[in-house]
Image (cartoon, grey):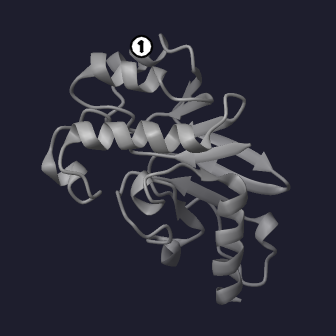
Amino acid sequence: MIYFTSDLHFCHNREFCYEPRGFNSVYEMNEAIVKNWNSIIQPEDDVYVLGDLMLNDNETGLKLIKQLKGNIHVILGNHDTAEREDLYNTCYNIVSINIAERLKYNKYHFFLCHYPTLCGNYDDGKALRKHMINLCGHSHTKDKFADWDKGLIYHVELDAHDMRPVSIDKIIEDIKIEYEKGL
């Protein structure tokens, strides 16, 4: 199975990061992310993390990343520095690192990027499978359709999905419902 998420922000010890997510501390947040992730993801699953895996304490952040199940594909975010990219390369479960990526799944086309990105024309009446759909994070929004008014943009950050990765099939289901509303 393929899953998506973003903005884990392991070790980001700032109230504005963990408190809106419902946690009393960064340690509580870190623990919940690992627990939630591993309750869903199986070792053979592919998980695309669309940026911002960790911040501040790289040593602890790496230990947390190495606890995560699955094959992790990293799309770099604004907090994923060159130093962190080098550190990600030491993780056995990180299988690829890119700045952006294109993915085709069941005839649906996705552009994976940390940032909300308009990547296609929003032509009325055109079949959903003919569009390029942007999957993104960055905004820490709780609304997975926060940028839908700008184009086919779907947010996968933890904040929008109850602090859990979301499956590609659930994303397609959500998008189909929202897309049908606009026709």
Q: Is residue 14 left or right of residue 166?
A: left
Asked whether 18 or 85 is in front, the reply is 18
Q: Is residue 40 left or right of residue 19?
A: right
The vertical placement of 39 against 99, above or below, is: below
Q: Is residue 49 visible?
A: no
Please provide percent x and percent y for residue 44. 72, 29
Point 56% across, 71% down: residue = 151
For the C terminus, the image quarter is bottom right
**Mark 1 Cα-neighbour bin, 10 Å: few <14, some 14–19, many ≥20:** few
Q: Which amino acid does the dot numbered 1 rest on?
A: Asp
Please provide percent x and percent y for residue 37. 51, 41
Q: Is residue 30 visible?
A: yes
Asked whether 136 or 170 is in front, the reply is 170
Q: Is residue 106 left or right of residue 42?
A: right
Asked whether 5 or 103 is in front, the reply is 5
Residue 140, picture quadrant: bottom left
Point 69% across, 53% down: residue = 168
The vertical placement of 156 against 28, above or below, is: below
Please provide percent x and percent y for residue 28. 26, 42
Please provide percent x and percent y for residue 92. 56, 13
Secondary element type, mark 1 = helix
For the N terminus, the image quarter is top right
Name the residue beneath numbered marker 1: 86
The vertical placement of 83 against 107, above or below, is: above
Q: Is residue 175 left or right of residue 97?
A: right
